[in-house]
Amino acid sequence: MIVDSTALPEQAVQAIIESAFQSAGQRCSALRCLYLQEDVADDVLTMLTGAMDLLRVSDPWDLSTDCGPVIDAEAQAGITAYVDQARIDGRVLKELVAPAHGTFVAPTLIRVEGIANLEREVFGPVLHVVRFQADQLDAVIDDINATGYGLTFGLQTRIDDRVQRVSERVRAGNIYVNRNQIGAIVGSQPFDAEGLSGTGPKAGGPHYLSRFCLTPTRQVPGQWNREMQDLPPATKAQLGQTLSLPGPTGELNRLTLHPRPPVLCLGPGTEAVVAQATAVTVLGGAVIVADGHLDPARLTTLGGFSGVIWWGDEKTARVLNLALSERDGPILPLITGQPDQGHAMFERHVCVDTTASGGNAELLAGAE
């Protein structure tokens, strides 16, 4: 999460507390690294440490509990050892006291120089904080993107242009503006990620169901063209566009489709390659055609593609799948049936609490 100098500090601190410490920080979407603009860092940290003092670490059966235990003793030991080392290094800014009995870890705030210092995810109530100068915003985004991970990202600002600029540059599947970054709602906030964090399409989104459908193992051009003619007009119109999703008054939810890197079409055979390329391009994607003339071993290092389509024999499919599994970086699929929207395009969701900037502009515009 990035908090700039224009953010409402009370709102930012509430979002930070919820995102970092609810569920003892054991959420895939939890806040792990907080960037505070230097101009407001001292004030926000004063409010944040004060808010941490109000957290109750106790039995989750008690409704007054804010932070419960971590999942098991192994997790507790690993997180505690990490915090112990940070304390030895003099980097612990704030630490609560955990109950003596149970697998509790006290909510902790740790200073780091940047997100690159986080060599692994600490899956618990541990928040890392970084200070940055106003002119370093682009460098901060570059550092975040350089990790290769992109599940959730938070931004606290009241500058509309900054919302646009940052949401276009950050490579994360879910971007939350002026609110917490946990607890995605099905239908309003489709949930998945980019890069090393997920493969898409988004859970709870309009293109998710197709990933669970059984598709034929082979398609020919004529059959695919007939199927495209049978698609509902609304589906065709939505390809490549931004969708406004339903949500509560005062909240804006938008789902945008972006082309993935090309899909590698391996056939086998010219007819299959043509059908594969047609299927992907109609869905808005790009293709690279190899027509089966590719040593599967090259898939372990070859770059510039987002998946492989193969409609041939199962033995070759297993070899291709094994080669893809040995790659470093994001998981790439072997598509043995008809490609779907998620294979051609990736989805990015942006959720904005519009009340943070002084009111719901869309609601006001619609008033008599």
Image: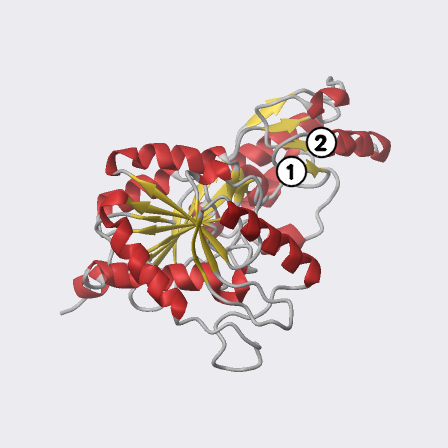
Instruction: Give residue 358's mark.
Output: none
Residue 296 placement (x, y as % from top left): 76, 23
In the image, residue 341 sits, relative to residue 15, either above or below, namely above
Assess disc 2: are there few (<14), some (14-19) or many (≥20) residues with their C-alpha within 10 Å of its C-alpha: many
Q: What kind of element bears circle 2?
A: helix
Residue in the foreground of this view, choosing between 282 and 342: 342
Residue 299 placement (x, y as % from top left): 70, 24
Disc 2: which residue: 324
Residue 134 location, quadrant:
top left
- Give the CA distance from mark 1 to mark 2: 8 Å
Disc 1: which residue: 331
Q: Is residue 151 visible?
A: no
> Which amino acid lies under the numbered mark 1 shown in the image of this protein?
Ile
Residue 356 placement (x, y as % from top left): 25, 60
Q: Is residue 256 left or right of residue 202?
A: left
Residue 87 placement (x, y as % from top left): 50, 50
Residue in the foreground of this view, choosing between 42 and 37: 42
The residue depicted at 53 percent of the width and 66 percent of the height is 23
Q: Is residue 267 left or right of residue 195?
A: right
Q: What kind of element bears circle 1?
A: loop
**Contact flag, marks 1 and 2 (Cβ < 8 Å):** yes
Residue 12 location, quadrant:
bottom left
Could you tell which of marks 1 and 2 lies nearer the N-terminus? 2
Residue in the foreground of this view, choosing between 356 and 6: 6
The residue depicted at 23 percent of the width and 63 percent of the height is 360
Q: Is residue 61 left or right of residue 258?
A: right
The residue depicted at 46 percent of the width and 44 percent of the height is 172
In the image, residue 200 sits, relative to residue 251, either above or below, namely above
Q: Is residue 300 visible?
A: yes
> Which amino acid lies under the numbered mark 2 shown in the image of this protein?
Leu
